[in-house]
Amino acid sequence: MRVLVAGATSVPGLPLLRELDLRGHEVVGLTRSASKTPQISAAGAKPAVADVFEPAQLDAVMAEFAPEAVVSLLTTLPAWGPKRPKDFEPATRLWSVGASNLVAAAQRAGVRRVVAESVIFAYGYPPTGPARIEETDPYPGPPPPGGAGFLGALREMEQTVLSAGGIVLRYGIFYGPGVTHDELFVKLAKWWAVPAMTGTGILSWVHIDDVARATADAVERGREAQIYNIVDDRPASFGDYIRELNARLHRPRPWPISPRLVGLVASYPATAFGRTWLPLSNAKAKADLGWSPRQR
């Protein structure tokens, strides 16, 4: 299958290029920066340069490569994670304009399969909920303080993809090699410089290698107009994540810090990682895609 991956040099993009190439697909990696094309070639894909905010450029790429499937990994956040709602402004534009342009270009070109990256926070930021959240209720939770705009753009992007018969993958919080914030926490833990946030929040996580495998599985056999939770088997709090990281590195047990104190300097993480209840079920992805996480 000829697969075009937009956002090809993103954190999940390069592992996905390698996974699709390993499976024998003909892969095209889309970037708006010509300087990044060597990374795409090194991952086993053909590079293509186009700006997703320019529909004519997307049409030209679709005409040149004639993909049978398109994967949208269009998101952008600060390397070490967003601190406040305003940090989502570039991602909001990608979700509301760039992704819509990509889906429309794929439809004009007759592409039959579109797979798009989303994130567990599309469910919102509920403080409580069921033991496992399934895809049956797609938007149960409220936005974080000041975050109605970016959450609305994320959900609108999902609906654009689903309305076109595409597939939405809600990834858990990434960890593993090449994940910028994970590598930062590893460095800080070695110096005993990262605290373990307390609070009632529970999140779902996923190793970056499992992300690549699940996305390739969705390209090959995902059902049309479906949402899939792509998460590992063990939800955990941010504090648990930091404590396990320290233990793995044989560092002292980290000191605790309350979400309220974190909120004084970083309002978004205080809500998203300290108070939000998002333990997700991956049963649907296992059943439909034949995928199962190998990590944790």
Image (tube, grey):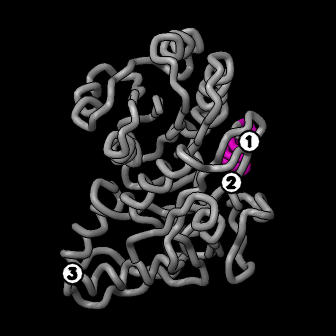
Q: Main secondary structure of the magenta part?
A: helix
Identify the image quadrant of residue 20: top left
Give the label on residue 162, or none: 1
Q: Choose between 9 and 83: the one closer to the eye.
A: 9
Label 1 Cα neighbours within 10 Å, binned few <14 / some 14-19 / many ≥20: some
Whether tag 1 and tag 2 are in contact, CB under 8 A, the answer is yes
Q: Is residue 187 above or below residue 104?
A: below
Identified at 36% across, 58% down, the residue is 209
Q: Could you tell me how far apart the alpha carbons at marks 2 and 3 are, in whole angstroms? A: 36 Å
User: Magenta stretch?
Assistant: 146-160
Label 2 Cα neighbours within 10 Å, binned few <14 / some 14-19 / many ≥20: many
Identified at 39% across, 71% down, the residue is 294
Residue 131, how many percent across, how many down?
Answer: 69, 83
In the rendered structure, the answer to whether residue 14 lies left or right of residue 206 reads left
Closer to the camera: disc 3 or disc 1? 1
Closer to the camera: disc 2 or disc 3? 2
Q: Could you tell me how far apart the alpha carbons at marks 3 and 1 are, in whole angstroms? A: 42 Å
Identified at 39% across, 31% down, the residue is 27
Whether tag 2 and tag 3 are in contact, CB under 8 A, the answer is no
Residue 153 among those drawn in magenta? yes
Q: Amino acid at mark 2?
A: Ile
Residue hosting label 3: 249
Residue 81, how many percent across, how many down?
Answer: 44, 55
Residue hosting label 2: 227
The quarter of the rendered structure image containing the C terminus is bottom left
